[in-house]
Image (cartoon, rainbow, N blue to C red):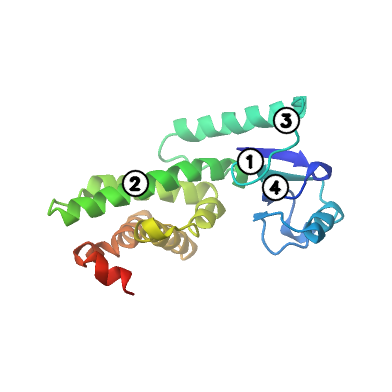
Amino acid sequence: MLKKIKVNDVRLGMYIQEVCGSWMDHPFWKNSFKLAEDKDLNTLKNCGVDEVWIDTGLGLDVNAGVVTHSQNEEVLKVESELTKIEQAPQKTEALVSLQIELIAAKKLHTKAKEAVVSIFSDVRMGNALKLDATISLVNDINRSIIRNPSALISLSRLKTADSYTYLHSVSVCVLMIALGRQLGMKDDMLKQAGIAGLLHDIGKVFIPDEVQQAR
């Protein structure tokens, strides 16, 4: 769960999801990181930034205590924005903050991995490729990138050994759509680029596992 807290309440072991303010306002070269060293904690508390967003799913939560009125307001705001995203028409392209889109992007990232696993499994079994499902997934990824490209791009770095091929395919799809938007590609071309990224490793289904593991 994402929470906005005062810098004075930050402690070692927390996962800093976003430092509030411009990247020029703080000395850290990346916005998301786990706070593990005293020197980084001291730097954060003395750099002039007032608030940060933490992810309690990846690090420690704030000290147990009464939830403040301002914290309740932040939670309600996040839930309201997520509801708007989930209920918005497909063509809606409203920009949202990183902390809001990251929650939606995590759900999409999981859904995308499951979809790619299903696609690869169907092809391995000799079934026809379900392009409708693939196109729908690419469209969802495209809309997330429109709302805030940093969310899915940051998640695209997450890969585990047992699902590397599937998450790599999702990552390539995300990066191709993001790059295509930067290059000014139109919707049809973006869709083709996203599908190509999602399916670029489809040939691996015909390679024996022992050969892939021997790389």
Q: Residue at x 26, y 48 (%)?
A: 118
First along the sequence among labels 3 and 2: 3
**Mark sitting on residue 56:** 1
Label 3 CA crowd tier, 10 Å (few <14, some 14–19, many 20+): some
Instruction: Say which residue label 2 marks.
Output: 114
**Mark sitting on residue 14:** 4
Query: Of 62 and 193, which appears nearest the observer?
Result: 62
Please say if the residues under marks 4 and 1 sit with CB atoms less than 8 Å apart. no
Residue kind at label 1, given as amino acid type:
Thr
Cα–Cα gap, marks 2 and 4: 29 Å
Query: Of 147 and 37, which appears nearest the observer?
Result: 37
The quadrant of the picture occupied by the N terminus is top right
First along the sequence among labels 1 and 2: 1
Label 2 CA crowd tier, 10 Å (few <14, some 14–19, many 20+): few
Nearer to us: label 2 or label 4: 4
Q: Residue furthest bottom?
A: 215
Residue kind at label 4, given as amino acid type:
Met
The x and y percentages for residue 107 are 46, 41
Q: Residue furthest left?
A: 126
Q: Secondary structure at mark 2?
A: helix
Q: Residue at x 72, y 30 (%)?
A: 71
Label 4 CA crowd tier, 10 Å (few <14, some 14–19, many 20+): many
Q: Secondary structure at mark 3?
A: helix
Q: Residue at x 35, y 58 (%)?
A: 194
Label 1 CA crowd tier, 10 Å (few <14, some 14–19, many 20+): some
The x and y percentages for residue 20 are 73, 48
Residue kind at label 3, given as amino acid type:
Gln
Residue kind at label 2, given as amino acid type:
Glu
Instruction: Say which residue label 3 marks.
Output: 71
